[in-house]
Image (cartoon, grey):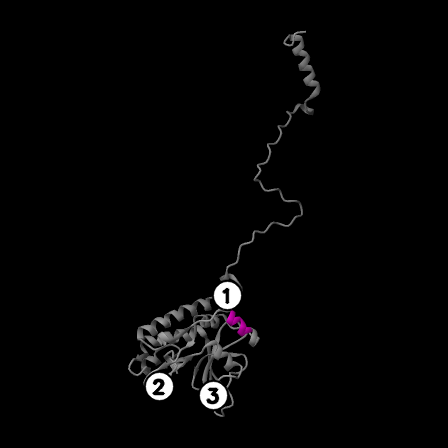
Amino acid sequence: MPPNSPANRARLVRAARTAAPPPPGGAAAPSPAPPAPASAAPAPTAGAAPVRHLVPVGPLQRAGASGADTTRVLQLVDVLRARWARAGADIATRLRPGVDDAALDAVEHQLGLLVPRAARAWWRSVDGVEPVRTRYRASAPTVGPGGWVPLGLAEAVRRATGRGPGPGAPPGLLPLFARDEELIAVRLGSSSAVVEQLVLAEQGDGYQHSWRVPLETLLSTWADALLAAVLWLPDAHDWVVDPFARQALPHSHLLD
């Protein structure tokens, strides 16, 4: 029988219908689903935990490394530097470079207490001062208001552990600034930096507490005082205070 004869074509159609019968109800047979692209993500398995996309954490995002108080102290250090330089004060060129975080971590380990964030920011910027020697004397430069000398971290630790010059600081306090036998110290063990003035008691066997304020409040008051109330005398290598301008400032008691 010729392949293209009508009888042969009818036989092939009957064979195809027998091999692939239509689905019940006369519905058309579904087309096969197209293959998924190679880049498609696999479907989640029932009961599996959702996938979490991890974002790298930078240094300023780590716990205890950032805060509004830290930012404010760093800004105030820049303001103080600019005003010391504008006045031509000795301290402007005698500041020691700050310490690194490893040194501050070692202090925390030695003292067994947390150094507040803002105090860490101060020491990362300023680690005390170099003395100034003139024809008549050698002295440590002061910040101006109140005549306070910034302490280096090593000297602060010596005073906190009773091994420095003068009476040691009370437990839980780390000195930031010194003036004769008085200190301004930060209270340890908290993330917030609260500083307090410590005045040597009349008996000479300890300190009396005067005032307590946040470190940024103290530095801000000093920066404001350098605008008009506390002026630098280049010939004398010293500061002079306008008492009337000083009393007009907020927190003027922090300038005594």
The answer to whether any part of residue 63 appears in the image is yes
Q: Which residue is mark 1?
A: 65
Which quadrant is the N terminus positioned in? top right
Q: Which is more N-terminal, label 3 or label 2? A: 2
Q: Residue at x 40, y 78 (%)?
A: 130
What is the three-letter code of the residue carrying label 3? Leu
Spatial CA distance of label 1 from label 2 is: 41 Å
Give the overall secondary structure of the magenta segment: helix
Residue 157, horizontal then vertical, whole percent: 51, 79
Dot 2 amino acid type: Arg
User: How far, Cα to Cα, is label 1 from label 3?
Assistant: 34 Å
From the top left corner, tell me how far across and down residue 148 is, in percent: 40, 81
Q: Residue 97 placed where, x, y %?
A: 42, 71
What crowding class fits label 3: few (fewer than 14 Cα within 10 Å), some (14-19), or many (20 or more)?
some
What residue is pinned by disc 2? 137
What SS does tag 2 mark?
loop
Name the kind of residue labelled 1 in the image: Ala
Viewer-nearest of labels 1 and 2? 2
Q: Nearer the viewer, mark 2 or mark 3?
A: 2
Crowding at mark 2 (Cα within 10 Å: few <14, some 14-19, many 20+)? few
Q: Position of residue 223 (x, y in %)?
A: 37, 74
Image marks 2 and 3: residues in contact by CB distance under 8 Å: no
Mark 1 crowd level (few <14, some 14–19, many ≥20, 10 Å Cα): some
In the image, the segment drawn in magenta is 102-108
What residue is disc 3 on? 200
